[in-house]
Amino acid sequence: MANPTTGSTGTGLDTIIDDIWADTGLTSSVSQADIIAGTQAADKMNQYIWSAIEAQNLFADGTISIADIHKINEYLRDNHYKGWVRNHGDDENNEETGFHLIQNDGGSTTLEYDDLVDTVIDGIYHLGFKIEDGRVLNEDGNAN
């Protein structure tokens, strides 16, 4: 399927959008409209992540540390929480919204034996939710 959406951060986060479109299991299972909406939501969350990194100059040393993750999380929750929740979306009660339009919908690409879209990328997008006991919680408040 052609890739009508691309990342807009100018960073490595943009490869997430390309990786979603490259997942043949996903593109053969989900409508193009849902993939477009899901990747647009992903790109918006990438913009939020990048704004947190830039605002705090966290990538000056070329790395993102665990302490930086906590700073990114705090920034996202303080500055973009409503937008984060909307763009991350959910898949409860037979209704899918945001990134969840494509999460758990047939993705077949893996990264180090984990499902890329359903586990790895979704895990990245839990970054805007609460961190408790060193674990990032998902949209339902469950530890990941």
Image (spheres, rainbow, N blue to C red):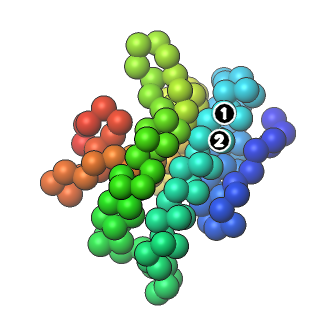
Q: What residue type is labelled 1?
A: Ala
**In which image quadrant can residue 32 be found?**
top right
- Is 70 or 25 nearer to us in this picture? 70
Secondary element under disc 1, as helix, strand or loop, is: helix
Position of the C terminus by quadrant: top left
Instruction: Name the residue at the bottom extreme.
Output: 61
Secondary element under disc 2, as helix, strand or loop, is: helix
Mark 1 Cα-neighbour bin, 10 Å: few <14, some 14–19, many ≥20: some
Q: Is residue 132 left or right of residue 82?
A: left
Residue in the picture at 74% in, 51% down: 6
Residue assigned mark 2 = 39
Q: Is any part of residue 73 visible from this angle?
A: no
Mark 2 Cα-neighbour bin, 10 Å: few <14, some 14–19, many ≥20: many
Residues at discs 1 and 2 in contact (Cβ within 8 Å): yes
Residue assigned mark 1 = 37
Position of the N terminus by quadrant: top right
